[in-house]
Image (cartoon, rainbow, N blue to C red):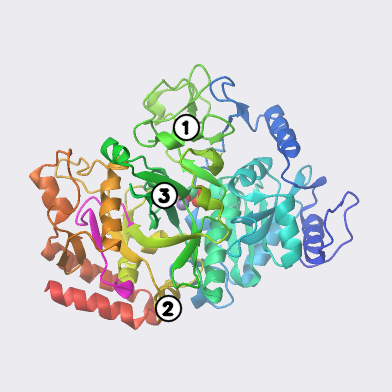
Amino acid sequence: MNAVTPLQPNFDTPTRLEALNDWVARTAALTRPDRIHWCDGSDAENAALLARMQADGTLLPLDGEAYPNCWLHRSDPSDVARVEHLTFVCTRERDDAGPNNHWMAPGDAHAKMDALFDGCMRGRTMYVVPYCMGPIDSPLARCGVEITDSPYVVANMRIMTRMGAAALARIEREGTFVRGLHSTGELDPDRRFIMHFPEELSIQSYGSGYGGNALLGKKCHALRIASWQARQEGWLAEHMLIVGIESPQGETHYIAAAFPSACGKTNLAMLIPPQGYREAGWKVWTVGDDICWMRPGADGRLYAINPEAGFFGVAPGTSAQSNPNALASIRHDTIFTNVAVTADNRPWWEGLGEGEPATDWQGRPYDPANGPAAHPNSRFTVSAKQCPSYSPEAENPAGVPISAIVFGGRRASLVPLVFEARDWTHGVLVGAVMGSETTAAATGAVGVMRPDPMAMKPFCGYHYGDYFAHWLSFDQPGAKLPKVFHVNWFRKGDDGKFLWPGYGENMRVLEWILARVQGTAAATQTEIGALPSAGALNLDGLSLSAEAKQALFAIDRTQWAEEFGRIGEYLQTLGDRLPEKLEQTRAEIARSLG
Ligand code: SAT
Ligand code: MN
């Protein structure tokens, strides 16, 4: 966007912030929308948008009695997940983006995007969406403005962020904001790019209307750009849920946990403890299900906020068994994307456990020969306030203190149920060498093992070596850092079945983790970390086979020695930006495994 052209005739701005007006005017001059609408986030505005989308078929109303004010959106069948191969980090120096990102020179990326955006909003309305990531009055929160031609994006951003007038007021006070420009373009996969310019604090996304590609406050801002800002400003922007565990004594500890997309973050964040725990007085509080921003507080502890205001959760597998809190949340005022519907027009997906699909996610009469009825990456978008377990502390501008950080992947073999890192450096290594099988959250093959350090492979906005160094830098005198753990809910037996029941039963693992934090649970040291001693993790009422117990609570040293060899090879791919301390720690463990 080079030439500054005069304002459009219909350019009616609610702000005097020159930087914002200037950017909106330049963008309008480039994209040529018919109208410009500044979003204030009001109920009236939302109602008008929803009505317009109903009229043009973008949103289909669901059964108004069972699901009041709920909508179905069907995205283009070629546009159903994040596109990592089309996602770029455009830093001046290629090495700053690192081998973990696709890179393009900023000049080339701008030229490419300017050509795509040129005139792309003709006949459309351009929405200007001011938003705040985090509680509006939190010093940990950060603001952005998304310009988009998708009313679906606007409606989702209103749920997922603090969007509208209050955000604009904060932006005016601060004068700085992340600039996100988005157009659905033609939804042509060959004309689709998600570009990040961390040095300019800007994002440009073209050709997709889906989730993390289009709701720019989410992965693009709150992870890729924010991770870059966080490194400069001394904080952490992480792909983590935040959950509060209240003990029968009334003490609440907060855990931040990193899992790759579609590995159960939402379920863990909304966990309902097993009956025995509930009767004893345990409670679980949801702070966030996807993203966590943390910063050291004056007392040396890490304080975290959830920058989001809603959940963009995976629908398939969500049931009264797996996640009753999610089911309760999505009974009204929810946008469903790419789910199936029943004959009586209710949303349906595989694993829901009730009803039958009549129409699949593409709007065809359901036929099992066409594959699943709901897309495996189908989603619900819902305000966090609708979740029965939503923590009042989630709105605390100071954030919540984090007692434990948990890393976890989807690992069918090798990795035990839970282990504890020796110290912060070892914890960073544990996060750095995480691997996980790929899921439907991104296009491409599913079930392929890949390294996914700290569940940030698709989201870290800079070189992984620098990122690990940044993590290590929090180990300062006076710091009271959380203990670090690794969990694996996905271990399978020889018969291919999961060995651990998961879901609510994961409470047992969280209890052990918190007891370790308080120094009251026994652990057995191994080369890879401390595992629960026999009897230290409550298994009462579970019937685990001897094979399951062996796999879940012991390590195979020979296989781990091989794993640490592979880990070494992976870390070498990060080149000379890899902190020496990490490789030293890896090498020590590898030697001890023999
Ligand atoms: O599409 S999103 O990035 O918003 C969801 C996810 O992959 O976690
Ligand atoms: Mn995610």
The relative height of residue 514 versus residue 440 in the rendered view (above or below) is below
Which quadrant, please, contains the N terminus?
bottom right
Disc 3 C-beta below 8 A from ligand 1: no
Q: Residue at x 49, y 23 (%)?
A: 359
Residue type at tag 3: Gly
The magenta region covers 408-426
Q: Main secondary structure of the magenta part?
A: loop
Classify residue 260 as left or right of residue 121: left
Which residue was labeled with disc 3?
Answer: 444
Which residue was labeled with disc 1?
Answer: 328
Residue type at tag 2: Ser
Query: Which disc, if any, is residue 94?
Result: none
Task: Say if residue 287 shows up in the picture.
Answer: yes
Q: Mark 2 and mark 1 in contact? Answer it, CB < 8 Å.
A: no
Classify residue 355 as left or right of residue 22: left
Q: Nearer the viewer, mark 2 or mark 3?
A: 2
Q: Earlier in the sequence, mark 2 or mark 3?
A: 3
